[in-house]
Amino acid sequence: MTTRRILIGGALALPALVAQAQERPIQIYVGFAPGGNIDLAARMAAPFLERHLGGAQIIVVNKPGAGGMLMLNDVAAAAPDGRHVALVSFPALVTALYDNTPRYRVDSFAYVGLLTDEPYTVFVGTDTPYRSLRDLVEAARAQPEAINIAGAGVGSAPHLALMAIERAAGVRFTWVPTQGAGQAMQLVQGGHVAGSISTVSLTVRAHIQGTLRVVAIMERERWDRAPDLPTGVEQGVDVLVGSARGFALPAATPAPILARWEEAVRRTANDPDFRALAERDFLIVRHMDRPTMTRFVEDQARAYGELWRTSPWRR
């Protein structure tokens, strides 16, 4: 994807921001528990953002709850000083608006850059009898609501993905909400639930290592990094879902600080060292600059808002 390069000259170097950050670290907030895919992405990006923000110290702060909504509430109300930054996930940011009472709106944030975009996978425990998504669907058809699927929160993006699978296949599972993807994976690996839904970066390595079994990737075509993984489409479940992640600051943040962050995200996305780590950990880099990400968020809000009005996901 071609992105617009933002030239940051001496006038926008923001030495005051760096000096302030050295006194009090910049905080990147994650709305889920440690160990999940969003948390891992934040911790991977943090040292590169430090580098491209001129050495400002960054710490990752986990504030799990309500599918990320509690963290988003806090960041929306935070001081617009460039030190409070959310790693936001889509569609979770917009879907949380429809069946909750958040204190934020889509325009509560300035969106300074998308960093990753990944398809979801459906995975099960290695001790389960399910060898494919088709097996899992047929079992749910035979025993409606008897099969437990775990994932982050109620109304979260993985929860909505499961509902989309249910609608497409005409079956019902039982959703088990967790504090994040990491906890859901632990439940699957421990045999406490049958399966879960999360991104390729969290699940494919574990699949290769044999600690869980990915039964479908929710993409139109197979992924070249793991060509043995079948798509949901080829198993009769035409559902294409995933998770895109980027950075957002309070909407009132001054333009020079937003420009600095936009450039830091762009540089991180294009940093060869970051891309090497992303490749190693099956993380899919997809950069969008600030205008492009803002349009992406607006499109997500319109699309999911229409879906909500015509087919509510409330249980």
Image (spheres, rainbow, N blue to C red):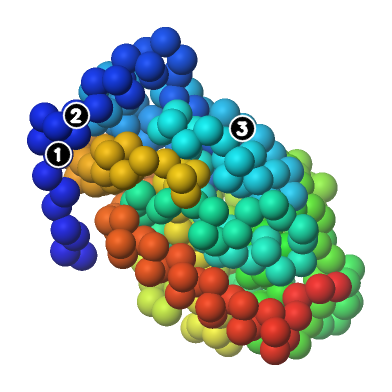
Kindly identify the amino acid type of the residue bearing the numbered disc 2.
Answer: Ala
Residue at the spot of label 1: 8
Kindly identify the amino acid type of the residue bearing the numbered disc 3.
Answer: Asn
In this rendering, does residue 169 appear at all?
Answer: no
Looking at the image, which residue is at 46% across and 45% down? Answer: 252
Q: Residue furthest top?
A: 23
When asked about the image quadrant of residue 263, the answer is: top left
Q: Nearer the viewer, mark 3 or mark 2?
A: 2
User: How far apart are the two marked residues, 3 and 2, measured between alpha carbons?
Assistant: 29 Å
User: How far apart are the two marked residues, 2 and 1, measured between alpha carbons?
Assistant: 7 Å
The quadrant in which the N terminus is found is bottom left
- 3 or 2: tag closer to the N-terminus: 2
Give the structural element (helix, strand or loop) at label 2: loop
Looking at the image, which residue is at 67% across and 61% down? Answer: 96
Looking at the image, which residue is at 70% across and 89% down? Answer: 310
Which circle marks residue 13 in the picture?
A: 2
Kindly identify the amino acid type of the residue bearing the numbered disc 1.
Answer: Ile
Q: Locate residue 160, reporting x and y percent.
A: 67, 69
Q: Is residue 11 left or right of residue 291?
A: left
Q: Nearer the viewer, mark 1 or mark 3?
A: 1
Residue at the spot of label 3: 62
Give the structural element (helix, strand or loop) at label 3: strand
Task: Answer few, some or many: residues within 10 Å of disc 1's Cα (few below 14, many 20 plus, some between 14 and 19).
Answer: some
When asked about the image quadrant of residue 142, the answer is: bottom right
Report the front residue among 10 and 285: 10
Tag 2 and tag 1, C-beta contact below 8 Å: yes
Report the front residue among 159 and 171: 159
- 1 or 3: tag closer to the N-terminus: 1
Task: Answer few, some or many: residues within 10 Å of disc 3's Cα (few below 14, many 20 plus, some between 14 and 19).
Answer: some
User: How far apart are the two marked residues, 1 and 3, measured between alpha carbons?
Assistant: 31 Å
Q: Locate residue 220, reporting x and y percent.
A: 42, 79
Residue 22 vertical position relative to residue 227 in the rendered view, above or below = above
